[in-house]
Image (tube, rainbow, N blue to C red):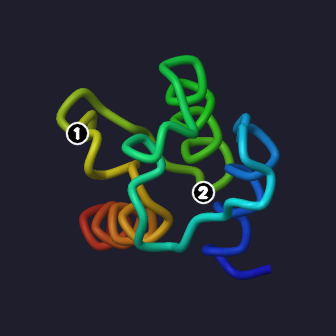
Amino acid sequence: MEVSEKIRAFIKTNIEVIDYERDFTDEEDIFELGFVDSLFAMKLLNFVENEFNIEVVPEDMDITNFNSVNNIIEFLERKANHSG
């Protein structure tokens, strides 16, 4: 499973969507769409750390790192480039 598929599956499993016909693209801000809350944000951080074996440090705690599938992927790529 690709990184984007893992992230998308996690988000879909853990969000509450009022309009079940509504989906989101990899570019859309899931927080702005109203799909998520602060509890989900913490679950998302935990998922990213555990699934991709990284540490999210206070400097990483910018919502733009986690508000879309694409931004999470870019964040993971930046973390990988800085750890090696």
Q: Camera-side residue: 28 or 74?
A: 28
**In this rendering, would 73 be left or right of 17?**
left
| Quarter of the C terminus within the rendering | bottom left
Whole-percent x and y of residue 26?
Answer: 51, 73
Q: CA distance from mark 2 to mark 1?
A: 18 Å
Name the residue beneath numbered marker 1.
62
**In this rendering, would 47 be left or right of 38?**
right
Q: Camera-side residue: 52 or 68?
A: 68
Name the residue beneath numbered marker 2.
52
| Quarter of the N terminus within the rendering | bottom right
Q: Camera-side residue: 46 or 32?
A: 32
Q: Camera-side residue: 34 or 14?
A: 34
Residue at point 54%, 73% (across, down): 25
Secondary element at tag 2: helix
Residue type at numbered disc 2: Phe
* Dot placed on the residue nearer the N-terminal end, 2 or 1: 2
Q: Residues within 10 Å of mark 1 (few under 14, many from 20)?
A: few
9 relative to 51, above or below: below
Numbered label attached to residue 53: none
Whole-percent x and y of residue 22?
Answer: 68, 60
Residue at point 23%, 39% (across, down): 62
Which is in the foreground here, disc 2 or disc 1? 1
Taking the view exactly as shown, the residue that stands out farthest to the bottom is 2
Residue at point 71%, 41% (across, down): 17
Marks 2 and 1 in Cβ contact (< 8 Å): no
37 relative to 9, above or below: above
Residue type at numbered disc 1: Asp
Secondary element at tag 1: loop
